[in-house]
Image: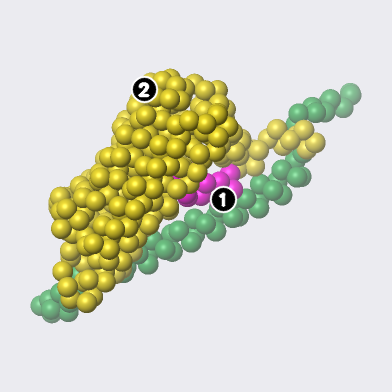
Chain colours: A yellow, B green
Amino acid sequence: MDSSTGIQQADLGADVSDYFALLKPRVMSLVVFTALVGMLLAPNSLHPFVGVLAILTIAIGGGAAGALNMYFDADIDAIMSRTKNRPIPAGRMKKNQALGFGLFLAGFSVSLLGLATNLLAAGILALTIFYYVVIYTIWLKRITPQNIVIGGAAGAFPVVIGWVAVTGSISVESLVLFSIVFLWTPPHFWALALYKKGDYEAAQIPMLPNVAGERATIVQIIIYSALLAIAGLLPVAFGFAGYIYGGVAAVLGIAMLTLSVRLVGGDAKQMRQRARKLFTFSLSYLFVIFLVLLLETLFFRMSGVS
Amino acid sequence: MSEPKKNPDEPNQQLLSEEYKKRQRRRSIAIALGLVTLVIIFYALTIVKMGPDLFSRVL
């Protein structure tokens, strides 16, 4: 409430930028990137217009899941510093507007993806939205410290959707890409949870550092980073990536693992700084290994070597 | 007859309507652009999906 004018924010109606913020643009950029990688790595190809449309619908589907997440999480978003300026907790939008917007976009994106590509891809997009909103947001997020592990699957689906949109079927390659994003999620978010521990505590979300303690979280981060480093090499093992990718994935995998191990030791302040560093590095990790995999594949494809 | 007491919580109507109209207009423009985009998408998708078959039908 603005005391000088007596205007309630919600009375003004939400601005277009608020609707855009509901889509979680930053999460959306990751969704777009991984879906694009899945699509371009797939052995066949789509008509460029259909390809662009497929990426757009996958992005909108991800945005719909974000809007529905903000509807159900409005109470805890209001408490955490990271999220309290979102449109609903900040009072710029009514909860039901986010619900309507999210439901509409979810139905719209799934239908359009089905029309443009195939029903399997549309089905997995629908499953992704359901998984993120119902399984993760409504159910697991507030009751188990393993929320991020199980919820991580939602973030790993887009790369499979991209692949399936082109090929029409789920194959080993798409599952390998899925496993990389899936194993990347826990260390990424636990690193965030380590230096934003107070936030999650205030909102009573059972993140691992709050429930099991920092030490147990660091152990889990190290385990998942090790698994991730191995999963990063699977594309080479399954024969759809070459040694350039293999080298980059090995170096970055070891770097990720090293940063995780470095969380052990040092005082609380140092640990939080290192956790922040790991969080930032993990973003580059995923971006770089997927980009190299993509460039290498496209290079070999264009030069006629397979 | 005395004038009704002014409620301090009551929104300032003039300010409210100006900002309200601005936002409403921006929302309307966004919806219009969205609809035009949809028309283009469905038109282009239809042409792409039908492809050469469009011209090989029996006339």
Give the x, y percent position of residue A223: 32, 34
Name the front one of labels 2 and 1.
2
Q: Residues within 10 Å of mark 1 (few under 14, many from 20)?
A: few
Instruction: Using the rendered view, name the quadrant where residue A133 is placed.
Output: top left
For image coordinates 59% across by 55% down, the residue present is: B26
Magenta region includes residue A196: no
Give the x, y percent position of residue A232: 27, 49
Give the x, y percent position of residue A162: 27, 55
Q: Tell me if residue A226 comes above or below residue A112 in the rendering.
A: above
The numbered mark at residue A149 is none
Left or right: residue A2 versus residue A304 is right
- Which residue matches tag 2? A144
Q: Tell me if residue A207 comes above or below residue A254 in the rendering.
A: above
Residue in the foreground of this view, choosing between B1 and A198: A198
Give the x, y percent position of residue A77: 53, 31
The chain letter for the residue carrying disc 1 is: A
Name the amino acid, label 2: Thr
- Which residue matches tag 1? A17
For image coordinates 58% across by 44% down, the residue present is: A14
Outermost residue toward the left in this view: B58
Residue in the foreground of this view, choosing between B55 and A238: A238
For image coordinates 32% across by 58% down, the residue present is: A248
Residue in the foreground of this view, choosing between A100 and A121: A121
Q: Label 1, secondary structure: give it.
A: helix
Left or right: residue A64 versus residue A95 is left
Q: Quadrant of the N terminus of chain A?
A: top right
Magenta stretch bounds: A14-28
Residue A190 visible from this viewpoint: yes
The chain letter for the residue carrying disc 2 is: A
Of mark 2 and mark 1, the one earlier in the sequence is 1
Q: Quadrant of the C terminus of chain A?
A: bottom left
